Image (cartoon, helix red, strand yellow):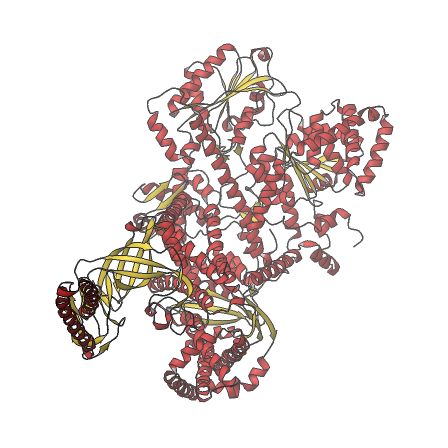
Amino acid sequence: MAGIPSATWQMLGQRTSGESLPKGLDAAWDTGIGLVGRAVPRYKRFLRRTEKILSLEKKISEMTDSKLRQVAAEIREIFRCQRDKPSDIETAFAIVREVAFRKIGEKPFPVQITGAMALEGGCIAEMATGEGKTLTSTMYVTVAGWRGRGCHVVTVNDYLARRDAEWMGQIYRFCGLTVDYIEQQMPPARRKAAYMADITYCTNKEVAADFLRDRITLGRLRGLSSALVSKMAGGAKNLTDRLIQRGLNCAIVDEADSVLIDESVTPLIISGNAPNPEQVESFRQAAVIAGQLKQEIDYRIDHRYRDIELTERGKEHLAAITGDLGGLWQGNRRSQEIVNRALTAKDLYVRDHHYVIDKGKIVIVDEFTGRLMPDRTWRDGLHQAVEAKEALNVNPPKDTYARISFQRFFRMYDRLSGMTGTAAEAASEFWQIYHLPVVTIPTNRPCKRKNLPDIILSNNASKWARIVQEIGRINATGRPILIGTRSVLASEHLSGMLKSANLVHQVLNAVHHRMEAQIVAEAGKLGKITVATNMAGRGTDIKLGRGVTELGGLHVIAAEPNESARIDRQLFGRCARQGDPGSAQGIFSLDDEIVSRYARNTVAYFKKRHAHSTDDISSPLIRGIFHLSQSRAERLAMRRRKNVLRTDNWLDEQLGFAGSE
Amino acid sequence: MAVERPTFHESWFRVAQLRPRLLSSVQVYRQHFRGQMWYVLENPSSNEFSRVSSDAYHFIGLLDGRKTVAEVWRICNERYGDYAPTQPEVIQLLGNLYCSNLLYAELAPDAESLFNRYHTRIKRRIQGFFSNLLFIHIPLIDPDHFLSRWVGLFGLIFSWFGLLLWLVVISAGLYFIVGNIKELFFQSTDILNPDNFIFLYLSMVIIKIFHEFGHAFACKRFGRLNGSGGEVHVIGIMFLVFVPLPYVDASSAWAFRKKWHRVVVGLSGVMIELFCAAVAAIIWVNTSTGTLHIISYNIIFLASVSTLIFNGNPLLRFDAYYVLSDLIEIPNLSQRSKNYIYYLVKKYCWKLKSAYNPAHSSGEKIWFLFYGIASTAYRVFICIRILLFLNDRLPEELFVLVPIFAGSAVIAWIVVPIGKFIRYLATSGELARSRGVAVSSTLAAMALIVISVGILKVPEYFRIEGIVEPLNMAVVYAESDGFVSDFLLSNQTVSPDGESLITASNPELEAEKKGLLAELRGFQAKRRIAQTRDMAEVQMLDEQIEALNEKIARIDYELAALDIKASLEGTWISPDIDKARGLYLSRGQMIGLVADLDNVFVRAAAGQELAAMLINHTGNFAETNVEIRVKGRPDVTLSGQIEQILPAGKEQLPYQAMGYAVGGSIPTLIDDPKGLHAAERFFEVRIKPHFDKPDQLRSGQRVVARIQMPDRPLLFQWWSDIRQLFQRRFHI
C-alpha cells in the first residue's frame, strides 16, 4: 500500500459526479442568489486588490533573480500547506507579474491582474479578445500549481496548448513549477507524465477522454473504498499504475462559453467498432424506401421542430413495402424507426449546411459555429442514414465504452474558473450549472468600435443585395471587410454574388478550413474582403494591415443573427481590438431563421406590411423582435442543456447498480 | 425525433455487460387486471413491491445472473419482436427494480451513490412526514407472532359462520336504531361538546383497534388459507390530525391470488366497525344513562359516520377505494384518473401529440373519467361539509381550529396545485412545442373564471320573513255600555254609510232619557205658567230647560254610539261576534276591527347585517326588487318594493309569528315567555306589494320576501359571506 503515490489516492478519491442540481424552491433560491450576485459588483472588490498588487511592484522589481526565486519558494510552501491568507495571493500575483516581465518581457496590465483575481475567486472572467488572456491566467495558474494538486489549463486546440505551455513555461519554471501539455497523438506514458506536472495544458477533449480511459481502466472499481479492498485482496495489482490522471482538482477553461455552454452537452464518447452488416444493409434499404414515400401523403415534416411524422397511410404503405424484407424489418416499430431516420436525413439534413463530405466521410458542421466537427457523429442511426443517403460507405454505429458530457465532466472539478470574450449573456447559465459568477473586465485601452445600428430588410433577396452593395461601398474606401455568415451555403451564395459584382474576396468556411489561419491573417489588409462562417478561425487575431487604421479599421458585417447574442458579439469582437478603430453592423432580414422560428406570427405580419419594400425597414420594434427571438432561443437552449444534465443525474441514480458513468 | 419507442439508448453501454438478476428472496405473483397479465414482484424482507407488465417480465425472467443484459435483450428482440422492451425501457425497468431493492447486480454500487440514495430516502421520508403532518405513521412493534397464535380463533370471523353472525348482529342493530332514530339525531348536537371529547376519543380508539385488527386477522387468515403470504409485521401509532390512533400494515394482502380474499381484507375493517356500531346500538338502546351509554352512542356515531363518509366510501382514498380499485381491476385508480383527465386536457385542449394515455382499455377510460370527476367533487364537498359542521358544532373556545383547517385545505388543494401547475406550464419539457397553446388556453380559462366570478355582476338575493298587515285599519271599540241587540257577522264588507256593525241597547239610558223628557215637559209647562206672571222665574226655568236639553243630547249621543258604524271602507273582522248577542258591552271594550284588505303591506324584520347592506346599497328603495312568496302557497308570487326601513333598531317583535319560538326566522330570547323579544336587534322593513289580482295577500299571512340587492360579482358576495361568518363567530 505504501508504494502508491499520493496522486493516485487523489484519483481514487475523486468524486464520481458533480453536485446534483437543486430542485424546486431550492432551485429558485439558487437562481435568486445568482441574480443578487450579479447585482453586487465583484469587479470593484477585485480592483481594490489589484491596486495593492500594483503597490508591491517597486519592492519586487528591485529584487535580484535569485532573491525572487527564494521569495517564490517561500510563498509556495505557504500555498502548498494551504495556509495562505488573502495577502499571500496579492504577493504571489505581484511576484508572477515581475517574473513575466523578466522572462517573456510582458508585464500584465492592471486589468489583467483583475482578471486573474476573478479567476482566483472562482469566476468566469469576461475579457475582450486580444486582451492577453493567456498572460492573465499565468498569475492564477502559478498559484494553483503551488497548491500542488495539479492544474489543468484547458485550451481550444492542441496547437494553443503546446504554444502556451512553451511560451508561459518560462514563467512557471522560474517559479519552481513543472509544466507540460497534452497532444492528441501522445502515448499513455507520456500523458501520465504530463498530468503529473504541476501545470498541464490540454484541450477539453483530451482531458475528458483521458478521464474516461481511466474510468474504463478502473472498470467497476469505483471509489476509494472498493479500490482499497481490491488492492488488499491483491486482485488489482497493476491497476493503479495504469491510471493516467491524478484527479480533477483545478481547471481554467479558455473560451469558457464555447466549452462550458455551446459544446457542453455534446458527449465525449470512447467507442470501438462493432460491425453489424445486417444493420448497415437496413440503412441502405431505408434510404431507398424513403425515396418511395411521398411527403404530405405518407409523412409530414415539422420544420419548426425538425421532426418527421409518418401518417397512418404512410405506416400502411411502409408495412406493404417492407412486408417481405425480413431481418430488422420484421417489426413495425423498428422499420418505422429506421425509415423515420432515413426521411429525416433526406429532408431535414442538407449537404453543406448541416454537413460536408470530406474524403468520402460525412463531417458535421456545427450549427452554432459553422465549424467542422470531424470527430462528431450523429446519434440514433441518423449518421448512418445520412451516409446511406449520400451513397457513402455506411459505418455501423460504434459500441460505446464510456461516455460523458463536458457539462458533467467540468462540474466534477473542485475549483473551476474560466475566461472568455463573451460571457455576460450566459451569466445565468454559468451560475445555475457551474456556480460560476461572471465578472466583466474592462479593456486596457478604451474600445473604439463603432456599433452601427442593424439594417433589417424584408426578405433574403434584398438582404443579399444590400450586403453586396455595402461591401462595394466600403471596399471603395479601401477598408478591409469581414462578413460573417451562419452556414457554408450562405457563404457560398454570397461568394457567388460578389463574384458577379466583380469584387475580389476570400471565402473562409468549413470547406476551405485548411487555409483558415492564412486567410484570417490576411483579412486585415487593405481592401480585403473576407467571407467567413461565424466561428471560423476563432482564436486568431486579425491584425490590421498598413494604412488601415487611418481609414477606420476593419468593418464587420453579420449577415444573419445567431441563436445567441453572444455569438454575434464574438463576430463583432473581431474588429477594433486593442484600441484599434473598427466598426460593425448587422444586416438581417425577416426571412432569417431565428425570427421565423421564434417569432413566427409577428414576423409574418411585418413581412406582409413591408412586402414591397427593398429598403431598410428597421425600427426599434423590429429590432426588438430580433432581440426577443434571440433571448428566447438562448433560454430554450439553456433549458435543454439543463434537462440533459438532469436526465444524466437521474440515470445515474437509477443505474446505481451499474456504477457511475 | 417523433419515434414513439426509440430502440436505442445512449447509456445502454452502462448496463449492457452487466449480469443482474432478481434477488433470490423475491417472490413473483401473477395477477390479472382487465384481461391483462401483470406480475407482482415482492421482496418479503423489505416489504417492497413492484408491478411489471408481462412483456417486461419476459425480460426479467431471462436474467439469470449468467447472461448479460445485452444478450437477454437480443433474445427478447428475436422472440417478441415489437413487444420486446426497447433499450430505454430496459434501463428504466432495471432502475426501478434496483430502486425498489429487488435487483441483485454482481458489483457493489459505489459507496457515495449508496449514501446519496440513503440521504434522499431519509429526506423524502422527512418531507413526507411534514407534508403529511395530519397523517403521521409511527411503526412500533411486529405483531406477527401474536396474530399467528390467535388467528385460529379470531380468523373464524372471516368465514361463512362469521358472515352469518355479522348479518344477524347488523340487522339487530339496525332494528334498534330505526326504532330510536329521533333520539339518535337529537343527541348528536352534544357530540362535539368538550365534556364529550374524552368519550369520543375513547370510542375512536376502541373502534380503530377493532378495525385494524380486523384487517390484520383477515390478512393472516387468508394468508394461512393460501398457504403463503399474509404476513403482518407492523403495528404502530398513527397521528390522525394529531390524535394518536392505532394502525396495522396489512399490505401483504396485495399479493393474494384470489380477488375476493383481497377484497375481504380490504373491507374487514369497515365490516368490523359496523359490527361494533350494531353492538353499540343494542347497548345504547337498552341503557339509559352512564358511561356505557355515552360511549356506545359515540361508537354508533363514529362507526357509522366514518364508514359512510370515509372508510366505506371509495371516492376517498381509504379502505373502500382500494377494494374498488381491486374489484374493477384498475390499480392506482385515483392517480391514473387524475392523469387521464390531464391527458384529455393535454391531448384535446393543448393538442399535445406526445401526451401519455394512462388508460389501457375503453372500460378504463370510462372509469377514469367518472372517478376523476366524482372523487374531486366529493372531496371538495366533504371538505366544505366538515368545515360547516365544525363551524356549527364546535364550541367557542375550539373555534380557532376552523380557520386552521380551512387554511390548510386551501393551501393543500388550491395553492400548492396551482403552484405546481404554473411550474409545469413554465418549465415542463413535454410542453416545449405547445407551451403557447397551453399557456394561452389556461389563461383563457382563468380569464373566464375571473370574469365570471370576479367581474361579471350577478344578482344577489336575501330572504327575510314578514307578516302581511293591512295598510288602513280601524279597531272598533265600544263607546258606551250596552247590551248587544244586533250585529253584522264577521268578514263582510262595510262602509261608513252602510249597515251598522253592531247595535246595542241600554235600557237604563233609555229610562233615564224618558225621565228627563218627562222632567222637561214639566218644566216647559211651568214656564208657560210663569210667562204670564213672573219674568224672573221664566229666566230661571229657561236655564233649567237648557241644562236638561244638554243632558238629553248627551244621552242621545250615547244611545247613538250604541249603533256602531264602520269608520272606513273595508272588511269587518270580529271572529267572535256571533256569540255576542245579548252580551254586555262596556265602554272601551274592543269589538273587532275594520281593515282595508285590498291595501296591505308586509312588515318584515331584517337582521343587522342585512339592514346595513340594505341601507348602504339601496339608496333608493323604490328601485329595489322584492319578490314575495307566501308560506304554504308556492303558487303565489308577487313583486313588491321596499317602502321604508325604520331607522332605529328594535328588540320587540311585532308578532310572535316572526320569532323562533313559533317557527319564525328571528331568534328570540329563551327566557321571554311571549317569544317577542328578539335576541339581536333587528330593523323593521316595510315592503309594499304590487298586486296583479285582488285578494292575493291576506293580512296576517306569513310571507318570505326575497330582496334583490344591486348586482355584484360572485367573488365579492362570497367574500362578504365569509367575513360575516367569521365575524359572527368571533364577535369582532
Front-most of A338 and B26?
A: B26
Q: Where is residue B95? Give x, y as percent.
A: 54, 59
Q: Quadrant of the N terminus of chain A?
A: bottom right
The answer to which quarter of the image holds residue A81 is top right
Q: Write the residue at 49% across / 69% down.
A: B394
Q: Nearer the viewer, residue A131 or A494?
A: A131
Q: Is B324 displayed left or right of A238 in the figure?
A: left
Report x, y in % for residue A254: 64, 33
State whether residue A301 is above or below residue B476: above
Residue A406 visible within the image: no
Q: Name the spot of residue B150 as percent of width and height, x first.
A: 55, 86
User: Would residue A422 be visible to someone looking at this image?
Assistant: yes
Q: Is residue B224 above or below residue A470?
A: below
- When asked about the image quadrant of residue B133, the answer is bottom right
Q: Vertically, is A406 above or below B390?
A: above
Residue A135 location in percent, x, y?
70, 28
B629 left or right of B651? left
Most foreground residue, A16 or A21 = A21
Closer to us: A256 or A350: A256
Q: Residue furthest front?
A: B533
The residue lying at 77 percent from left, 48 percent from top is A6
Q: Residue, x 12% and y 64% (percent of image)? A: B532
Number of marks in picture: 0
